[in-house]
Structures are given as structure tokens and as C-alpha cells.
Amino acid sequence: MQTSPELLQPAAARVQIALGDRSYPILIGGDLLRDARTWAPQADRKAFALIVTNTTVDALYAAPLAAALAPHFARVRTLTLPDGEVYKDLAHLNLIFDELLGQEADRRTVLFALGGGVVGDMTGFAAACYMRGVPFVQVPTTLLAQVDSSVGGKTAVNHPLGKNMIGAFYQPQQVVCDLDVLDTLPDREMSAGLAEVIKYGASIDVEFLGWLERHIDALRARDRDALTHAVRRCCEIKASIVGADEKEAGLRAILNLGHTFGHAIEAGMGYGAWLHGEGVGCGMVMAAELSARLGLVSTAFARRIEALVARAGLPVRGPADLPPARYLELMRVDKKAQGGDIRFVLLDGESHAVVRTAPEDVVVDVITTLTAAA
Ligand code: NAD
Ligand code: GLY
């Protein structure tokens, strides 16, 4: 009797994304990346494995990952992209295709996305496009990528006129969240990841929101037990939503609390000036305030979200040099916009979200109130 590859894997928490024949596991634990057994499910001794990473993560984790993959593949190479949201574009996506074609990579090739959300989104999109689809694995190395971007199959690059506007839904074969790699993450990036963690509590799970209020300092200090719980709970919530609405026909949109304002800040300030998580953190404060002004949720709950975002080390005021008119212009190209109407994820109860339009004058007033003094 043959042992299934999953049984050979190291001990780790597992969350399953249930999507029929495209289902896959998320592994959460320590010391997973360097362990060759982690990668047993992808083993194909005739295949080429390409690790896609960036300059920062390459120096830290590409060599150990390549060594752990080596027993499973015919050959393993690493492609290193420049580091930054500003490079998440079609020109740099093309570097992945240049490498694949230059190496005569065939349909059995497996791509390994080693990095944060930028590398994950780009590698996933390249995997979706190359030869109309090759397998890929997410190896998220930021908190943000472990709790959100590596899970659920959204892949994309940016366009100067809008964030994540060119992409595809394409699911990975496996997601491996090795918590050890978070030890090297800068504090600012930890805070950015906490924005997406808070999002799940604020818009979906009020019990988790309370847990976050009690453990936010432990998370910032990278306490292992707190991190394990947070990454696992976020992945469980995301799994249930993606399992019900993979392609965002409706429900999945609630995972975008704060993103309409946040994407406008990111694009308006120039990609990379504000981190994605910083835009989302401040955007959640704006979305909660807008919800309160529309009478959908109590002002007390909006303040609760603002306090937690601030404790996570994130900005709670928009940039002084981004006027409301520029937000409106950018928000009209948001993916949730319909017929020129901006649609927001708003809170219509404590940890309950809805997608709807809002009167423009109220939106402008909220942005003005929540903008830092020049
Ligand atoms: P990122 O990928 O730019 O990574 C942040 C920084 O941390 C980079 O400088 C990176 O090199 C560095 N880094 C990564 N891992 C490290 C480690 N272990 N140690 C030290 N440094 C490390 O940013 P991010 O916050 O991970 O992801 C943001 C991106 O994710 C945005 O482009 C956003 O649009 C996308 N996103 C996608 C989804 C989705 O569902 N696909 C969801 C949320 C966000
Ligand atoms: N990050 C939102 C989503 O995956 O739908």
C-alpha cells in the first residue's frame, strides 16, 4: 500500500479550502519551509520547479527552499524580481514568462511563490497564464500574505489607472504558512498584516474581534501561540467565504472592508508610499465612520475599530495631500463600482458587513474629517 504524500508531511495545523477538484490545504506551523517533507504532495521527479521571489526574500529564504525542493524535482531554479509594489506590473510579470520560455519550461512545471502578497499575486497570475495554466504553490512570507493574499486564488498585477485591475482567479495547489519566517519581518510590515487580520474581526467574527483586542500587543510582539491562533482563524474564515463564493459573485466582497478607501490612498499616493495594509487600516476607519454616519452601526463600534487599528500601529488618518475629489476619481475604477457608482463594504451591525452605495456628500465629509492636518 502506498502512503499518500499528505501523510508524509510534517506536523502542522491544516485548514482546507473546499472547492471540489480544486481543493487544497493550508499548512500553518513552524519549520515547514526547510523541511523536504512539506513539499511531498508536489513531488514530480520529471518536472522543473521555479521559485519566484524578490531580492529581499531571496537573501533570506530562497536557498533553504531550493534545498528542500531539490529531492522532489528534476531541477530547481530561482527567479528574483525587484522588491516593491511599484514593480507589480505587466512589465515585471513578463520577466517570469521570459524565464519560463528561456528554460523551455513545459506544462509540468511548478511555480513556487516565495514572498509577500506582491510576489504571490504576480506568480499566481503567471501560473494562470503560462501555457494556459501550470500548477503553483504559495509560500507566503509576510503576515498579510499568510492571512489573506495567498489564500483564495485572487491573482493580479496593477495598472497605472487602478490597483489589481489585470488578473485572474486561479487556485494554488497548496499554501504553506511557515511562522518562523515572520521573525525577520520589519515591524511596519507586521502592522500592515494586522490590518487584514482586524478586517476579519471587524466585518465577520465579533468573537475574534474581542480576542484581537486582548491579544494585539502579543501579536505585535510575535508571540507564537497568538500568531498561530490568528493565522489559523483568518484562514478558516477566508476558507468558508471562498468555499461559498470563489469568484466574488456577492458574499466574498465583504472581505474588502476598507479596501475602497485604501486602494484610493495607495494609488493616489503612488504605489509603495503607503503599504497596502496601511491603506486598508485607515480605509477601515473611514468605512466604519461612513457606516456610523449612515446610521448602519453605532458610533461606539466605529470608535472600537479605530482604537484597534491605532493599537496595531497603523495610520487612522488619511494623507494630508490627497483631496476627497482624488479619492472619488480613483474609487470609480474600483472593481466593486457599477455603472460609475462607487460601492463600499460597510458595517450594518457589529462585525456584519454589506456592500452598498453611499451619498457622495457624506463620503466627502468622512474623508475630510478623517484626513490628517497639513
Ligand atoms: P509585499 O509583498 O510587498 O511584502 C512586504 C515587504 O516585506 C517587502 O519588502 C518584502 O520583500 C518583505 N518581506 C517579505 N517577507 C519577508 C520576511 N519574511 N522577512 C523580511 N522581509 C520580508 O507586501 P504584502 O503586504 O505581503 O502584500 C501586499 C500585496 O498583496 C498588495 O499588492 C496587495 O494588493 C496584495 N493582496 C492580495 C490579496 C489577494 O487576495 N490576492 C489580498 C490582500 C493583498
Ligand atoms: N482579499 C480579499 C479577497 O481575497 O477576496
Image: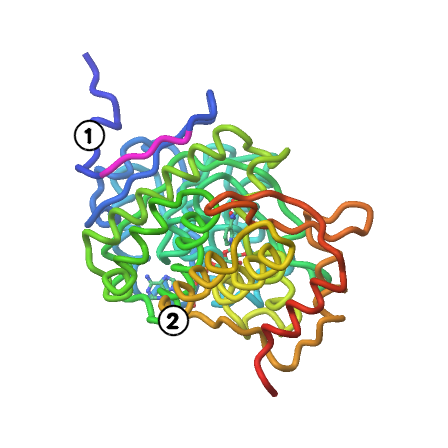
Quadrant placement of the N terminus: top left
- Dot 1 corresponds to which residue? 8
Q: Dot 1: what SS?
A: helix
* Residue 339 to residue 273: above or below: above
**Residue 250 location in percent, x, y?**
62, 35
Kind of residue sitting beneath label 2: Gly
Q: Which residues are magenta?
A: 13-17
Residue at 52% across, 55% down: 298
Residue placed under numbered mark 2 in the picture: 313
The residue under the point 28% across, 65% down is 220
Q: Is residue 166 above or below residue 195?
A: above
Q: Does the magenta-highlighted stretch encompass residue 299?
A: no
The percent coordinates of residue 238 (x first, y second) are 44, 39
Which sits in the foreground, 240 or 82? 240
**Of tags 1 and 2, which is closer to the observer?**
2
What separation in Å lies between label 1 and label 2 (alpha carbons)? 40 Å
Residue 335 located left or right of residue 306: right
